[in-house]
Image (tube, grey):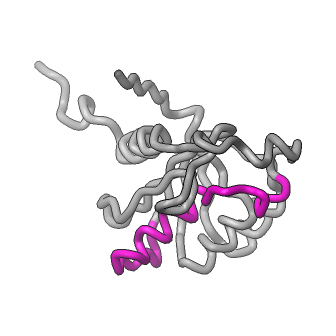
Amino acid sequence: MGKKCRDLRPSWDTYFMSIAFLVAQRSTCLRRKVGAVLVKDHRILATGYNGAPTGLRHCLEVGCLRDKLKVPSGQRHELCRGLHAEQNVIVQAARYGIPVINSVLYCTNMPCIICTKMLINAGIRSIYYAEGYPDSLSRDMLAEAGIEVIEVQDRIKFDITLQ
């Protein structure tokens, strides 16, 4: 007998997190490539990656201000040309009139504190992430807001080969 269909298909978590990693490939950040996918009822609402606002030059073109100023990771987020993937996914949904309340975020990285506050106010109910981020205040606020946070790195292998 052959394998059951569900044994041949990736789980929903694997599927959406794999898409987040693919979306991250569009990133124009020189420090970290991050992708985000907002999902509701197993349907993709919007995607986002980190990079400069639409129509502006990207760090790939002008260099990294944070590197020039020697700003450590996780600090002084305002000193950057780019938006984070989590910010962009919310903005993209808003731009096209897509409600995101009670949706689930799949993101390649744990959100920073700025993104965390936006995700809380946007009504995101769960966050799945693959890699950590040095921001304990973010974790504390997500816990206080009752948002479920799930690390999926140990359960999912992401192997995206682009040509």
Residue 38 falls in which quadrant of the image?
bottom left
x%, y% of residue 94? 43, 77
Residue occupying the point 83% across, 42% down: 68
x and y percentages locating residue 77 in the rendered image: 77, 59
Name the residue furthest left: 1
What is the tally of numbered marks visible in this picture? Answer: 0
Residue 16 falls left or right of residue 87: left
Which residue is found at the position 53% from the left and 71% from the top?
124
- Residue 37 position within the rendered picture, expressed as x and y whole percent measured from the top left: 44, 55
Residue at x-position 44% and y-position 25%:
159
Specify whether residue 127 is in view. Answer: no
In the rendered view, would you say 7 is above or below 73?
above
**Whether residue 65 can be seen here:** yes
Q: Is residue 102 magenta?
A: yes
Q: Quadrant of residue 67?
A: top right
Vertical side of 78 occupied by 96: above or below: below
**Dominant secondary-structure state across the stretch colored magenta:** loop
Quarter of the figure with the C terminus: top left
Tell me the quarter of the image containing the N terminus: top left
Q: Is residue 2 left or right of residue 137?
A: left
Report x, y in % for residue 116. 68, 66
Q: Which residues are magenta?
A: 75-103
Image point (66%, 65%), residue name: 115
- 83 vs 85, nearest the viewer: 83
Q: Is residue 65 left or right of residue 151?
A: right
Q: Is residue 36 magenta?
A: no
Task: Report whether 58 appears left or right of 111.
Answer: left
